[in-house]
Image (cartoon, grey):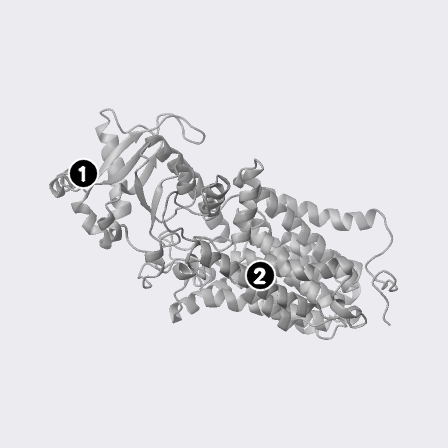
Amino acid sequence: MSKSPATRPAVPTRGAGSPGVGAALSVLVPLTILLGLIWRFDFLVDDAFIAFRYAVNWASGEGLRYHLGSATPVEGFSDPLWVALLALGKLLGCAPELAARALSVTCSVACLLLLRHTLQRDLSLGAGAVFLGTLFLATFTPAAVWATGGLETAAFSLAIFASWRLLAFGGGTLERSLAWLLPGILVGLRVEGLAWAMGLCLITRQGKASREATGMERNPRRTFLIAALLAGALLTAARLWWFGEAVPNTVHAKSGFSLEVLQRGLRTLASFGLVHLSVPLIALLFPLTQRSPQRGPARSAGLMLLGLATWNILVGGDWMPFFRFLAPAAPFLALLLAISLDARMLPGAHRRFGPWPLGLFACALSLAPAFGWHPIPREWRAAMNFRSFRTGYQTELERWQTGVRNVENFTRIGLGLAQVERSDATLVAGAIGALGFYSGAHILDRNGLVEARIARGPVTETRSAGHDKRVPRSFFIADRPTWYEVLFVDHEITGGRFDAFRRATAILHGRVFADRSEAALLDCTQAVAYPLRAEGPIPGGSSLILLQHTDDEQIARDFWSGFGP
């Protein structure tokens, strides 16, 4: 009979060492760096506010819906467990903006500590390799950026790494219970969570400790797979009951499989490697891991990275900064780096100085994009641009800064719309996050995330990563929306300020009618201005100018003949 986890002799580890200042610093240094980067990049991406609105409505007793009172709710999110956690936080008195940050930071710190435990106790690596692997995760910019952001990315990163570790190494009684819990978390956090759970069962194999054990400890994959299938079935049944659909509306909105999507996904992956040069460096070091006693876990981690890369290619990447879909690769990259550094097979300086020169170099490459430092020329990186924004190519840091400014602007617009006090108003919008959350307005969604008829429509010409079915504002003319576009200006344009109103109208005109497909709006719209009172980020004396619908074609033509370009 094999020994139980409680009586099995402890496996000596070269990295454990004796308690002391060095051991404490090996944890505190990476943790301090990670928390510093999290503080630097603390933000909320606009899409997070979509989940916030669902969570607040759910917690308020209105049901899991974006629009209050809608006959048939639409699942405009891909992370039901995340929305449920935010709704629970709201019930407990915690605003989703704060709850999302707290949950994500907690998951990021937990992932760092779990990686260190895995390197030291499960893989028995040397102290230097353990420290450098942990430091790499702390300095890997996408992991730090998406330790906030408001989405489920950090939670998913922790869940998928914890699942991999469980299946690769087994564990004691407490860890074995996770074979029932972790699959449900994976399935609930991402729409493709069941696929990840099944993939993990395929790419992992049990280590020495689990082969010595019996029962569930010997084969947690079977339990894990059963739990994943049960969670998937329960979630699908819940979707059918509430939304009347087996998959989220976002799947339809963001699915536009084509050669162009694959090419965009490949450009995203190439850009990821050009920006984060530590990634191709680790790929070059991978053969060393196959000469290590830990080649089995290394091979499994490599397959996990291959799966993440393939998924990114198939979906065409994502528009958000610092490669959100690839952020969960961070702990697996760190693990491969640590194993390769522990192999002690590199020539020259590596033999003399140990893993430190190469390991610190990898960490420096990992950290550089956080400060806009790039060894690769901008022209080379721009050649792999995968976003279709009018701004053209931006570095990931510039894209993050633009996103922060956009959310600040959308927040002001949302709060301003709430001041207009039109309970029956409808607004056409593409970015529906902060604008929709703070305004509470009924949104006609150009990207189809909460608009089923758009999501099930054809792929359009106005493609961008994750928004392949975007329609022009003029698509909604038959719906007679209240407003088609809104612009925030930080000064008054009402009360006889004719020149200020004309300048604001010119900006609004350029934003909308630069797209020729919006020409029909010239016959059914006019610009109107509303003064705003000071509130939160809205300074006193600000205004909103809105492209408002009119059924009188003559009024529309007269207005644009006077205020057109």
Residue 368, can we see it? Answer: no
Label 2 Cα crowd, 10 Å radius (few <14 / some 14-19 / many 20+): many
| Neighbours of disc 1 within 10 Å: few (<14), some (14-19), many (20+) | some
Give me the residue at 59% from left, 56% from top. 156
Q: Which residue is mark 1?
A: 563
In percent of width and height, residue 556 lies at 16, 41
Residue 146 or residue 10, whichever sits in front: 10
Indicate the secondary structure of the residue bearing disc 2. helix
Instruction: State the residue at coordinates (39%, 45%).
Output: 67
Instruction: Identify the residue at horizontal 67%, vertical 54% (top origin).
Output: 111
Which residue in the protein does label 2 denote?
231
Q: Secondary structure at mark 1?
A: helix
**Which mark, residue 237?**
none
Q: Quadrant of residue 307?
A: bottom right
Residue 464 percent coordinates (x, y): 38, 58
* x, y percent for residue 343: 75, 69
- Image quadrant containing the C terminus: top left
In the rendered image, which quarter is residue 540 located in?
top left
Residue 406 seen from this side: yes
Q: Are marks 1 and 2 in contact (CB under 8 Å)?
A: no
Quarter in which the N terminus is drawn: bottom right
Q: Amino acid at mark 1?
A: Phe
Residue drawn at (46%, 50%) of the image: 399
- 536 left or right of 351? left
